Image (cartoon, rainbow, N blue to C red):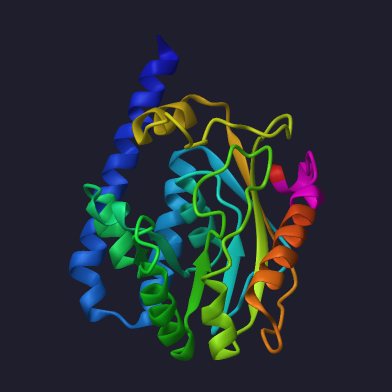
Amino acid sequence: MLRPLRVIWRLLLAIGHAIRGWCIITFRFPRQTPEERAGEVERWSRRMLEIFGISLVVQGVPPARGPLLLVVNHLSWLDILVIHSARHVRFVAKSDIRGWPLIGKLATGAGTLYIERERRRDAMRVVHHMAESLQAGDLIAVFPEGTTGDGKTLLPFHANLLQAAISTCSPVQPAALRFADRATGQTSFAPRYIDDDTLASSVWRTLSAPPLAAYLCFGDVQDAQGKERRAWSQELHAQIQALRGHQPARQADDLAA
């Protein structure tokens, strides 16, 4: 009986923290600088991970500033929180999220660029907006798999969004994400969000799981000059696959933090 009550309590804390985020975006953001907003997003995301019992283990060097395009594998709705906890970025996400109650407001307030994946030509519009943002010095993150994977294999990458980096000669940095049981270091599939999973079931499964660690491993920054998007996409796929393999089964010092 204690575990369901504990899960419900943490769920209530998460809802309360989400409402707090809505208030920050609505009332503070209009008076804040971009740097102050970024700090708010990072602090809010770290606190939400704490509520979910997830510690963050960062390996490699996160991007310090833009312009830069961050390319990451996609596992869960939690991925955005994990990356925001390490560094505030503007995400490219499916347009459905914009209509989600409360979450859509939070995503939009954090600077998300939306893409309608059902419309093939919409990618060109998004690439144009990404290029404008990169030229303005933004950090942008994309999930080139286009959807969440099962965490066991890396799905093929879509190359279209890389064109924004090529067109603006902006650097690209690969990164790999993995969730693991904090005690054993074994990969955890509790946060998965694939196939018939609903957001509610994924949230409940994550809250019910033993304490987790989110490993976020950053690779080397790469120059876009002279790159062709399809070939580069394949290179990045191999690099992120390798970064996933570099994530250790357990790091006692990091997990104890």
Which image quarter is the N terminus in? top left
- Give how far across and how far down residue 16 sits, in percent: 27, 43
Q: Does residue 21 appear in this view?
A: no
**Image location (x, y in percent) of residue 84:** 49, 61
Residue 187 against residue 148 in the figure, above or below: above
Residue 201 left/right relative to 155: left
Relative to 179, say whether 39 is above or below.
Answer: below
The quadrant where residue 169 appears: bottom right
Give the side of residue 144 with respect to residue 128, left or right.
Answer: right
Please name the residue shown 63% across and 32% down the image: 188
Q: Going 53% across and 53% down the picture, which residue do you hit? A: 82
Quarter of the rendering containing residue 55: top right
Q: Which residue is painted at 36% across and 73% down in the image?
A: 37
Asked whether 250 falls inside the magenta stretch, the response is: yes
On whether residue 184 falls in the magenta region, the answer is no
- What span is in magenta? 244-254
Q: How many marks?
A: 0
Q: Is residue 245 left or right of residue 146?
A: right
Residue at 48% across, 36% down: 194
Camera-side residue: 17 or 73?
A: 73
Residue 208: % across, % down: 47, 24
Q: Would residue 167 be visible to someone looking at this image? A: yes
Q: Residue furthest left?
A: 27
Residue, far top: 1
241 lies above or below 252:
below
Examine the image and state in which quarter residue 175 appears. bottom right
Compared across the picture, whether 101 is left or right of 180 comes to: left
The percent position of residue 109, horizontal first and vertical second, equals 29, 66
Of 186 and 151, nearer the camera is 151
